[in-house]
Image (cartoon, grey):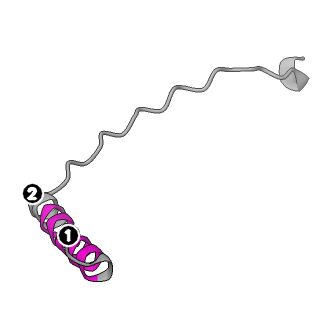
């Protein structure tokens, strides 16, 4: 007679996934791109506003 009784059960907690480490070459590439972007922005700033006197 227990066929029509709903049984509530707790779900097992999902195991958290370990974050994959960033490859070394990707960190170097991001650093180089950030430095290059800084130089480009500095050049654009000084070319548009004029060099300080």
The residues bearing labels 2 and 1 have C-alpha atoms spaced at a distance of 39 Å
Q: Quadrant of residue 11?
A: top right
- Residue to which mark 2 is pinned: 24
- Magenta span dominant secondary structure: helix
Q: Sequence order check: which comes first, mark 2 or mark 1?
A: 2
Residue 14 colored in magenta in the image: no
Q: How many discs appear?
A: 2
- Point out the stretch of residues depicted in magenta: 31-47
> Percent from the top left, x then y, of residue 44?
27, 79
- Residue to which mark 1 is pinned: 52
Q: Residue furthest top?
A: 1
Residue 19, above or below 1: below
Q: Secondary structure at mark 1?
A: loop
Specify the quadrant that holds the N terminus: top right
Q: Secondary structure at mark 2?
A: helix
Question: Label 2 neighbourhood size at 10 Å, few (<14), some (14-19), many (20+)?
Answer: few
Residue 26, above or below 8: below
Residue 43 colored in magenta in the image: yes
Residue 20, above or below 40: above
Identity of the residue drawn at 75% across and 20% down: 8
Identity of the residue drawn at 12% across and 67% down: 32
């Amino acid at each position: 007679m227990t066929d029509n009784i709903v049984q509530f059960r707790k779900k097992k907690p999902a195991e958290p996934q370990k974050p994959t480490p960033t490859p070394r070459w990707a960190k170097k590439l991001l650093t180089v791109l950030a430095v290059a972007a800084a130089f480009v922005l500095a050049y654009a700033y000084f070319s548009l506003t004029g060099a300080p006197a």
